[in-house]
Amino acid sequence: MSERKVRVRFAPSPTGALHIGGVRTALYNYLFARQHGGEFIFRIEDTDSTRFVPGAEEYIIESFKWLGIEFDEGVSYGGQHGPYRQSERRDIYKKYVKQLLDAGKAYIAFDTPEELDAKRAEIQNFQYDASTRAMMRNSLSLAADEVSALIESGHQYVVRFKIEPGEDVHVNDMIRGDVVINSSILDDKVLYKSADELPTYHLANIVDDHLMEVTHVIRGEEWLPSAPLHVLLYRAFGWEDTMPSFAHLPLLLKPDGKGKLSKRDGDRLGFPVFPLEWHDPKSGEVSSGYRESGYLPEAVLNFLALLGWNPGTDQEIMSLEEMVKLFDITKCSKAGARFDYVKGMWFNKEYILMKDNSELAPEFDKILRANGIVATMEQVEAVVGMMKMKKINFIKELWPLCDFFFIAPETYSMEDKFVRKNWGETAAADMSELADLLESLTDFSVASQQTAVEKWVEETGKKPWNPWRVALVGTGKGPDMYELSAFLGKEETLRRLRKAIEILK
RNA sequence: GGCGCUUUCGUCUAGCGGCUAGGACACAUGCCUCUCACGCAUGUAACACGGGUUCGAUUCCCGUAGGCGCUACCA
């Protein structure tokens, strides 16, 4: 069984946008598959027809495309183990439900939701299990002809798994080791509903994982309590020898306060919890996305990978390829991780610094256009190159730091602290000299200016840079003065210099 | 309530019986410097508590407390 080809899956429900925690689960599955030369399956678990949300499936697919996580087979990818949408696998599940029924490992129950509610109200800690099923309406407590009569007369029913009590069930978890739960605390889970002819998660999950030859189940910790049930199901089907290995990942927690990370936290603290912007078709609500907020997908993946895992070295910045090499599922942490979105922003900053200007330019160009600036791509790249190491986490933060490249200061004012401090008594005269010097240059390149200005500086002992900055920028921000002048060009540089001299004297 | 998982700086974490408990984010300071940054350096800051086991526990075991999850005809 160990020589089976590694096959893992990510199987979301199309009930809304893809949660960032789900993205991390998918990422870990992806890394695991890739490092073992295995396959990664994308399955849609839409067995709850009442919670289906149109557009969610497409949203999830687009999210992974943006992130750069590729599947080998599944919905929209094709493959030999389809269909990959559970709602299209009704007949398959029916067959396996019947198998369990015939073997006496499951039974039919007619109790209505109202009856169950009544029982729960009547008996505290009521659980549908070996100790209570005799008093319920099911094929174990009713006569055979009564059962068939009920079915024939159209009564809705569910199929429940018959749990044998008193047994210690072991789940071997790749992260947590041996987890033992006694079967007595498990209830007779509903496996199938006649109302929509669909199984519940538990049955569909086991059947699909088996049929799709899944070897490793890597999922969130919220599934740990039901893992013993799943083990029991594999056993009931006689599939224990090919049962997948399990790994239950720690959850992502709120950055502050209590509980797991939720959509509300993003709204409240101002960071996205979804990869892409999501427009809820029911409520009309719009939730921000990492893509639209200006995150680079590489940064998002890098950040997420380190929330619950690390390579055991001090390396934090790593490409997807490096992560594939370094990832170790057994080294995942066991406790939940607070979602530190501030560190997420730092990752984005690091990736911006690493990216070529040409890759960053299109996004900045959009922002320029939104501000009514039309520039050549060459200019946009130049500005991004000069300014990306400023204190920014996102390209969009560049604009307020960069406007002077495109818009000359309207006015100059001693109100500005930097101006007051740097435009001294001799500034006007010095800048006049500088302007004359620059005007004499035929070559206005950085190198040419630098040579000329530094020679003048050496001869006169003047320090022209800050007043020069006042003139070109209007305040204390911006790149190196030679670079800025070269970008603006001789004409504009002189124009700004002379205007400043005139206004500030 | 029951069951399970879990517990190292504010946060993410390294540590797998003996360490001045390491790194990163954030924060602070300094250096660099034509501004702001980048970069570099430094600093503040942690083993939840109580019992064991051991020559010796952050590390192993057991409790307690806290945190998290599950407890649906949702996944």
Image (cartoon, coloured by chain):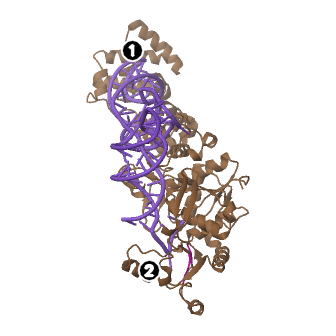
Chain colours: A brown, B purple
Give the x, y percent position of residue A487: 49, 28
Amino acid type at circle 1 is Glu
Q: In the visual, does A14 lie left or right of A504?
A: right
Residue A433 numbered mark, or none = 1
Towards the viewer: A157 or B54? B54
Q: Which numbered tag is attached to residue A116?
A: 2
Q: Is residue A505 visible?
A: no
Write the start and end of the magenta stretch as one range: A157-163
Q: Is residue A161 magenta?
A: yes
Relative placement, left or right, of A270 versus A74 is left
Q: Quadrant of the N terminus of chain A?
A: bottom right
Q: Is residue A493 visible?
A: yes
Amino acid type indicated by mark 2: Leu
Q: The residue tagged with tag 1: helix, strand or loop?
A: helix
Instruction: Indicate the quadrant containing the C terminus of chain A: top left, top right, bottom left or bottom right.
Output: top left
Identify the image quadrant of residue A84. Answer: bottom right
Return the residue found at the far left.
A415
Q: Residues within 10 Å of mark 2 (few under 14, many from 20)?
A: some
- The location of residue B8, given as percent across then percent down, is 40, 40
Residue at image position (54%, 43%) is A302
Q: Nearer the viewer, residue B61 or A350?
A: B61
- Residue A477 in picture, x, y percent from top left: 38, 29
Relative height, residue A234 to residue A137 (above, below): above
Q: Nearer the viewer, mark 2 or mark 1?
A: 2
What distance separates the C-alpha of mark 2 from that of mark 1?
A: 91 Å
